[in-house]
């Protein structure tokens, strides 16, 4: 006769596991003997080993009792069914692993390859990861709120990075992230950006998603906040002057 600790050691499980099997009804709990201990027979050890083996094989505890008492044909059919369920779970976990492996570059989960290529191009140009992530957010918002413009925006973005002056300004903005909002260099950068917008014939108005992105950019840097505010103010002045004339 075995104590509960010897029984657990014989089957390679913990005492807590044995008690759990008692609780769920898989292994009968013997009465206490005269000395107050519960004693287990060799059959209990065999049953516990069978339970542990089935549990280790992935059989749900709720199905183990039926398997322990099944006839060979019923046991084989049940094992086939359990194997099929395990295969479904393996396929699901494999898909999860595939998606997790992509998290090192999260934009690939939500953005098309041509947009990811733009983001990778920015990295290749030396744009900081902080600015790339802000750009990623812009594309995510665009895809959600104005998806039909995506192809044209991809073409525009690649064309912009083909232009040395546009690339220079982009990198200059990126480098200004930590500048004091009243740094004189910021005044010159605002002038250059304003001149670029005029040359590109932009009126400073932005779709809804770009307004959200501008807000996000402003939160990231006081210097960028001043750039956005200054360019918006100048664009509004030009629109007002145009209406008055």
Image (cartoon, helix red, strand yellow):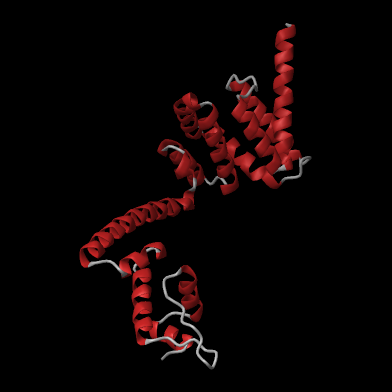
Work out whether residue 143 or residue 229 is closer to the camera in this orientation and state it: 143
Residue that extends furthest to the top in the rendered view of this protein = 245
On the picture, is 232 further left or further right than 37?
Answer: right
Residue that extends furthest to the front in the rendered view of this protein = 34
Observer able to see residue 211? yes
Work out whether residue 119 or residue 47 is closer to the camera in this orientation and state it: 47
Residue 32: x %, y % from top left: 51, 86
Q: Quadrant of the N terminus?
A: bottom left
Q: Classify 54 as above or below 46.
A: above
Q: Classify 187 as above or below 47.
A: above
Q: Classify 176 as above or below 236.
A: below
Q: Indicate the quadrant where residue 179 lies.
A: top right
Residue 241: x %, y % from top left: 74, 12
Question: At 76% from the left edge and 44% from the top edge, which residue is drawn?
Answer: 180
Work out whether residue 13 or residue 188 is closer to the camera in this orientation and state it: 13
Residue 114: x %, y % from top left: 42, 36
Q: Indicate the quadrant where residue 232 lies.
A: top right
Q: Indicate the quadrant where residue 243 lies.
A: top right
Question: At 46% from the left edge and 82% from the top edge, which residue is drawn?
Answer: 30
Question: At 44% from the left edge and 70% from the top edge, which residue is drawn?
Answer: 25
Q: Quadrant of the C terminus?
A: top right
């Amino acid at each position: 006769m075995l104590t509960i600790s010897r029984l657990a050691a014989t089957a390679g499980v913990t005492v807590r596991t044995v008690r759990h099997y008692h609780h769920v009804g898989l292994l009968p709990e013997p009465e206490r003997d005269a000395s107050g201990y519960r004693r287990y027979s060799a059959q209990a050890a065999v049953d516990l080993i069978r339970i542990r083996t089935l549990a280790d094989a992935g059989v749900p505890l709720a199905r183990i009792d039926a398997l322990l008492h099944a006839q060979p044909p019923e046991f084989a059919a049940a094992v086939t069914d359990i194997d099929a369920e395990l295969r479904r779970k393996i396929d699901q976990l494999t898909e999860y692993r595939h998606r997790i492996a992509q998290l090192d570059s999260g934009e690939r989960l939500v953005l098309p390859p041509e947009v990811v290529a733009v983001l990778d191009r920015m990295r290749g140009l030396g744009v900081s990861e902080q600015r790339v992530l802000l750009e990623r957010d812009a594309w995510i918002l665009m895809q959600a709120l104005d998806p039909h413009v995506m192809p044209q925006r991809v073409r525009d973005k690649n064309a912009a990075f083909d232009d040395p002056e546009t690339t220079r300004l982009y990198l200059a903005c990126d480098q200004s992230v930590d500048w004091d909002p009243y740094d004189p260099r910021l005044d010159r950068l605002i002038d250059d950006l304003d001149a670029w917008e005029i040359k590109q014939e932009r009126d400073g108005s932005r779709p809804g998603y770009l307004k959200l992105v501008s807000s996000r950019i402003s939160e990231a840097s006081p210097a960028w906040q001043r750039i956005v505010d200054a360019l918006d103010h100048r664009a509004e002045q030009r629109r007002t002057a145009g209406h008055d004339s």
